[in-house]
Image: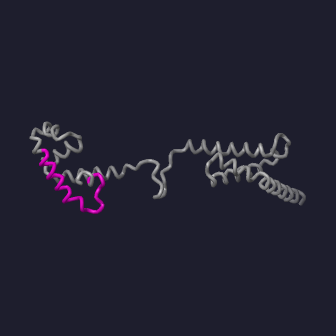
Amino acid sequence: MTALWSRTRQSTSDEALIRALYEEHGRALLAYATRLTGDRSAAEDVAQETLIRAWRNPDALTNGKGSVRGWLLTVTRNIVTDRYRAKAARPTEVAESASAPPVQQDHSEAVVDAVVLMDALDQLSPDHRDVLVELYYRGRTVTEAAESLGIPAGTVKSRAHYALKALRERYVKKPGMAAGLREVAA
């Protein structure tokens, strides 16, 4: 019975110590943590963690070596430093909400665009497809495409015109058309 009474009394005194610490140093801890983190919510978590560590180590507060506030501020700084290092060691996270842009670019849309574009080019005649590949995929000028294909520059322009017209008729009015194809056909 004496051990239970001693633990209850110790728990009550520890709780009173933490309450007193919070009342005396809580605002200073929160202000310091906010300045270090730049985020009020994170600062509240850091201040709470500081008080939890004080509760777990009451001897560090009552041993008379230095000021209590100095110890608390040092613990706060160490917690912020540990969190920063832990965050830097983790891989970058992808944003979960639609309002926040993703941290890393998702290449799936580019893959879908490429598949749709290849399908669209397969629907064209070989002459029209060759002209579009030279002009848009290889980035050649009309003169360079004409030399590469062995046809006059006017023919390159004519085939490009009719190939793009065919793509527009077939794909531009389709809902859900790939963005890359829309750019080429427009």
| Number of marks present in the image shown | 0
Q: Quadrant of residue 140?
A: top left
Q: Which of the pair 115/145 is nearer the observer?
A: 145
Q: Which of the pair 153/118 is nearer the observer?
A: 153
Name the spot of residue 124 as percent of width and height, x first: 16, 52
Name the spot of residue 36 as percent of width and height, x first: 65, 45
Q: State the colouring used for the structure image.
A: one colour
Q: Quadrant of residue 177?
A: bottom left
For image coordinates 73% across by 42% down, the residue present is: 74
Left or right? Give the position of 115 relative to 47.
left
Left or right? Give the position of 19 relative to 163.
right
Name the spot of residue 137 as percent of width and height, x first: 24, 43
For image coordinates 70% across by 51% down, the residue present is: 30
For image coordinates 50% across by 49% down, the residue present is: 93
Q: Bounds of the magenta span?
A: 156-181
Q: Is residue 132 positioned above or below 20 on the image?
A: above
Q: Looking at this rendering, what residue extends furthest in the right direction?
A: 2
Name the spot of residue 146 as percent of width and height, x first: 13, 39
For image coordinates 24% across by 51% down, the residue present is: 184
Left or right? Give the position of 175 relative to 142.
right
Q: Quadrant of the C terminus?
A: bottom left
Q: Which of the pair 174/123 is nearer the observer?
A: 174
Q: Which of the pair 146/12 is nearer the observer?
A: 146
Magenta residues, dominant SS class: helix
Q: In which quarter of the image is the N terminus?
A: bottom right
Residue 70 sits inside the magenta stretch: no
